[in-house]
Image: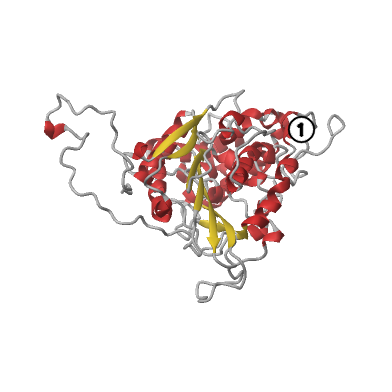
Amino acid sequence: MSLCTIVLLALSSFGGAAYLDRKQVSTDLSTGTSVPQYFQTAPEIYAGPTATGAAPFLAATNPAPFGATGSFVANAPLETALPIVGDTQNASIFHLMGQLSPYFPNPELFDSGVLHYYNYGHLYNTSTKIIARTTTQDRMLKSAEYFMAGFFGLEWTNNATLELIIEEQGFNNSLAGYFQCNNSNKAVNQGGTNASMVWENIYLQNATKRLQAFSPNFKLNVSDVYNMQTLCPYETVAFGYSAFCDLFTYEEWRGFEYSIDLSFAGNNYFQSPTGRAVGIGYVQEILARLQHHVFTTTGTQANITLDNNTQTFPLNQTLYFDFSHDTNMAAILTAFGLAQFAPVLPSSGPIPSNQQLIVSHLQPFGARVDIEVIPSPKPISATRLASTTDVYESGAPTTYIHFIINQRTLPLGASFPACGNRTDGWCELQTFLRVQNNSLAEARYEYACNGKYDAVPYGELTNGVPQPSSTGS
């Protein structure tokens, strides 16, 4: 079996480089220069030999299942190193901060590019120049540039062209799907915010009383204390240190993480009426790539002008890189129908022991979703283990699809029974496409984004779409 295509959806953050043979040397620079030779870095005068051998290829080698009971290895963060009361296992509170997990911005995307080079660099055809997509927002552009520098090296512009999709109200953009989904920014989509506030008033009661004792001239409420707690990750990533971090116990940091999980669940995942709709444009783009066709009509926030042109929506690449936002990535997972993240999280606690929707695992700073397409000469055993020697079964060539979130396999059979209970978490590609055939209809894009319907209490929605109401249908 071999992996022929990889799609990366990388989360925005501010974002040793791996080296690929350059496709070409830029001809934009003049060879005539007044810069002394000993200060001249380009064009390279005495470049010397640059043979590097074949690119590495470690794809599909990580056996760690998603949601395993073993330790969770998060992306390396910049941390405020202070002792936390109640942390008896020397755990890191910076693994408990949801999308605010303060992974140092620029190296995070750069290092992610290096990691993906080691996993997938072999797939890059050095005779081509690929299209990668991001948005016009400055931090989105910088994130993409840092990743590209990590993957291709500092002269990455010889290997890839960045396509910037306008991120602004009134412009279709699947990488920022909420701009063309009006209801996602209205009160009907505040269930997660409401649920988080309920939980904050529970887990921060003791902290509010404790901190009030140190502030006799200032009346603290729970909202003030929650904002103080939020300053820990923000100040750490901005200044490298925050004095707010050790004001809270380890259990209060676990409560903080859960507050973010509730917010995402109700505002972006399956408890949101616009959860599927915000992400459906990107899902439709992935399905189009998998089936090798451009768009002729969309009915979503996908940009039909760009997606109907193979110059801006190529179909022949072995590597695709797209850069999006944390909440948009959550909506994309919802639009795919990955129902293992659908169970309602109780707003009043306790924190579920088998919780799957943990934002610090799914959308931390610098998160990534890798989608691998894996052709095989024969069907592969659904029960194979790392020690299995004969992995093939009799039958015709079969292609599989494999989802990886932050280096953890996402078992597709957990959400789509048709994929089967495979130990590798894969799904036959044709089965996956059949499962996704109704994804656009299930998202109810026009009604979810622009229809009139009533807000319902958090927890009443479980499928990422609105309920019918007296003012809608």
Quadrant of image for the C terminus: top right
Secondary element type, mark 1: helix
Q: Residue 150 versus residue 343: which sits nearer the camera? A: 150
- Tell me the residue that label 1 is attached to: 447
Percent x, y for residue 329? 58, 42
Looking at the image, the residue that sits furthest to the right is 470
Residue 268 in view in this figure:
yes
Q: In the picture shown, does residue 450 fall above or below 407?
A: above
Locate residue 172, reporting x and y percent.
Answer: 61, 28
Identify the residue at horizontal 58%, vertical 64% (top origin).
397
- Seen in the image, is 145 located left or right of residue 305? left
* Quadrant hosting residue 331: top right
| Residue placed most toward the observer, 269 or 114 | 114
Residue 47: name its quadrant: top left
Residue type at tag 1: Tyr
Q: In the shown orientation, is residue 48 left or right of residue 233? A: left
Q: Residues within 10 Å of mark 1 (few under 14, many from 20)?
A: many
- Front one among 162 and 222: 162
Q: Is residue 345 visible?
A: no
**Residue at image coords 78%, 44%:** 460
Q: Nearer the viewer, residue 71 or 439?
A: 439
Image spot of residue 101 (x, y percent): 49, 44
Q: Residue at x 71, y 41 (%)?
A: 440
Q: Is residue 72 above or below residue 137?
A: below
